[in-house]
Image: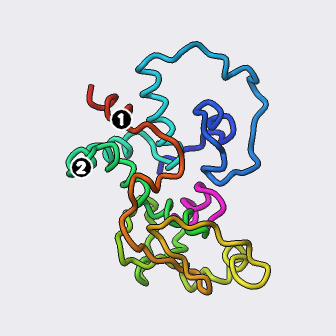
């Protein structure tokens, strides 16, 4: 399976994106300190930048992202909003948002390795689109892993602020999808209309 292995700090700087969006609160780079002193971007460059930003945050390559766009275009409503909502509904994104992983890349890896269940059934597909009413839980066989044991007990880290469309059980390693996410739930700045313009050409 193809993986996106782009360097986090360098790529975030190029996309004018906070590393915290991906779970890396302390990552930064000192390379190209005058990198922000660039000429005004062309319209095409701005469109590409927004597309690359969304792809990078959600860990998708072009083929998969294009299929998301085509699906969003077939749905009712605004294509740009639909596209971002589809990205938010990814299982790996929900796992990260619930605080079961410290970074988005770790969330994808944990899902790939089969550490999570949906309504009691193991799911190892990061791109699985969660639906309202579904319960996302750490698999019973994985709960003794150091990665998950640190999330419970007196020394457990503070629970992250969970988005409104999700609810995490404070006492158990599980969370519930309360409703469909909305455009307002996207946790980073993005001008999705530029992506739509790019793909509409």
Would residue 39 be counted in the magenta stretch?
no
In the rendered structure, find residue 117 and report the number of the disc placed on it.
none
Q: Which residue is mark 2?
A: 77
Identify the element where label 1 is drawn.
helix
Quarter of the image holding residue 152?
A: bottom right
Identify the element where label 2 is drawn.
loop
- Residue 127 position, x and y percent, is 41, 58
Q: Which colouring convention does the figure follow?
A: rainbow
Front one among 37 and 62: 37
Quarter of the image holding residue 170?
A: bottom right
Position of residue 43 relative to residue 120, above or below, is above
Residue at the image position 68 percent from the left and 22 percent from the top: 35
Around disc 2, counting alpha carbons within 10 Å, would you say few (fewer than 14), some (14 to 19), or many (20 or more)? few
User: Which quarter of the rendered picture does the C terminus lie within?
Assistant: top left
Q: Earlier in the sequence, mark 1 or mark 2?
A: 2
- Residue 5 position, x and y percent, is 59, 43
Whole-angstrom CA distance, mark 1 to mark 2, is: 13 Å
Would residue 106 be counted in the magenta stretch?
yes
Q: Can residue 111 be seen at all in this image of the molecule?
A: no
Q: Can residue 57 be seen at all in this image of the molecule?
A: yes
Q: In the image, is 174 to the left or to the right of 31?
A: left
Front one among 179 and 141: 179
- Residue 154 position, x and y percent, is 78, 84
Please provide the residue range marked out in magenta. 101-112
Position of residue 17 relative to residue 165, above or below, is above
The residue furthest top is 39
Residue at the image position 44 percent from the left and 35 percent from the top: 51
- Residue 92 position, x and y percent, is 50, 61
Q: Which residue is mark 1?
A: 193
């Amino acid at each position: 399976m193809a993986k996106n292995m782009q360097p986090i700090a360098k790529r975030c700087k190029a996309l004018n994106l906070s590393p915290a969006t991906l779970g890396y609160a302390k990552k930064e780079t000192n390379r190209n300190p005058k990198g922000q002193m660039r000429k005004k971007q062309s319209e095409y460059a701005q469109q590409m930048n927004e597309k690359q930003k969304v792809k990078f945050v959600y860990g998708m390559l072009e083929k998969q992202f294009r299929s998301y766009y085509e699906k969003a275009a077939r749905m009712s409503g605004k294509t740009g909003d639909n596209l971002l909502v589809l990205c938010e509904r990814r299982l790996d994104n929900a796992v990260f948002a619930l605080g079961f992983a410290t970074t988005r890349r770790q969330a994808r890896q944990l899902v790939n390795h089969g550490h999570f269940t949906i309504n009691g059934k193991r799911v190892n597909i990061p791109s699985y689109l969660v639906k309202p009413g579904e319960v996302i839980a750490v698999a019973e066989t994985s709960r003794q892993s150091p990665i998950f044991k640190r999330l419970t007990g007196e020394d457990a880290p503070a629970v992250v602020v969970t988005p409104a469309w999700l609810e995490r059980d404070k006492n158990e390693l599980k969370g519930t999808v309360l409703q469909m996410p909305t455009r307002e739930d996207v946790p980073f700045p993005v001008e999705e209309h530029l992506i739509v313009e790019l793909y509409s050409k």
